[in-house]
Image (cartoon, rainbow, N blue to C red):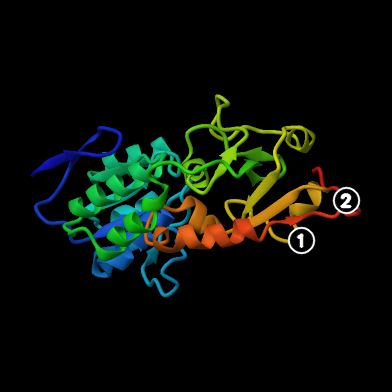
Amino acid sequence: MPSIRDDLGNEVPLPREVRRVVSLVPSLTEAVAVTAPDLLVGATDWCTHPPDLDVVRVRGTKNPDVERVVALRPDLVLANFEENRDVDLERLRAAGLAVWVTAVRTLGEAFDSLARMLAVCGCEEPGWLAGARAAWVPTAAGVPVRHRAVVPIWRRPWMVLGCDTFAGDVLARLGVANVYGDVAERYPKVAVADMLASGADLVVLPDEPYAFSAEDGPEAFPGMRVALVSGRHLEWYGPSLVEAFDVLNRQLTAARTVSASNDVGGA
């Protein structure tokens, strides 16, 4: 039985041919489903793309039904170093399953990680991955900073993007510098008052993991420009990267200043 090391350096024992895959990460689910749909036999409840995905559901990324995953007899389980808990992955390994863990903090790492993961699944590099690389070529040499932004990703309590995040790298390639990108934590808790006083000229509100919307989030930042963006295009690495450059640019350009007369939702 051959073995290869995943993004964390873990040795992953593999069958000679991968025929059955369970994915515990929405973006990886989409990557496999679009590339080789017959391989995928299980995915989490949060795996929403492709919209017509018809596989066994194994609960969430943080609380997968380990017994159900094992019962599906996958040749390979796909996971991510921050989406999934070590305790669940160890239980899957203890049950004799091969677990492949991705670790992605930059767009370049995403392209390389996806190519390796799909190769492990027996797939040649798909056209969509080549298209994604091409779509982001203009950003390879760096992009001038247009905005300094805070990027909340949760509310009650408020949390923001911190250091070493994939979303932060994507934004940087669009000319948006993350104000909290040099803090020690990846997702620090930050009070609204501190965000307002941070010197940011833009607030970026993705619709996941917290579902920020026009009615929930912007009112906390009166007088500031707020951009509502697609969490899938900002945070997922997979087929969504083909259109993410254009989608996010449009959404950032559409940022609007919040009226100071709105109620401030600081909770």
| Image coords of residue 152 (percent x, y) | 65, 44
Query: Which of the 4 image quarters holds residue 179?
Result: top right
The residue at which mark 2 appears reads as 260
Dot 2, crowdedness within 10 Å: few (<14), some or many (≥20)? few
Sooner in the amino-acid sequence: mark 1 or mark 2:
1
Q: Which residue is located at x 65 percent, y 57 percent?
A: 228
Is 98 on the left or on the right of 203, as rendered? left
Q: Which mark is residue 3?
A: none
The residue at which mark 1 appears reads as 215
* Type of the residue with mark 1: Glu
| Alpha carbons under labels 1 and 2: distance apart | 15 Å
Which residue is nearer to you in this view: 219 or 94? Answer: 219
As drawn, 67 above or below 91: below
Q: How many labels does the image show?
A: 2
The residue tagged with tag 1: helix, strand or loop?
loop
The reply to whether residue 148 is visible in this rendering is yes
Q: Which residue is located at x 47 percent, y 33 percent?
A: 164
Q: Do the residues labelled 1 and 2 touch (CB within 8 Å)?
A: no
**Of all residues shown, which one is farthest toward the top?**
184
As drawn, 232 above or below 183: below
Q: Which residue is located at x 28 percent, y 59 percent?
A: 130
| Image coords of residue 143 (percent x, y) | 48, 44
| Image coords of residue 38 (percent x, y) | 24, 69
Query: Which of the 4 image quarters holds residue 5?
Result: top left
Which residue is nearer to you in this view: 217 or 44? Answer: 217
Dot 1, crowdedness within 10 Å: few (<14), some or many (≥20)? few
**Of all residues shown, which one is farthest toward the right?**
261
Is 67 on the left or on the right of 210, as rendered? left
| Image coords of residue 97 (percent x, y) | 24, 46
* Type of the residue with mark 2: Ala
As drawn, 36 above or below 4: below
Which residue is nearer to you in this view: 220 or 144? Answer: 144
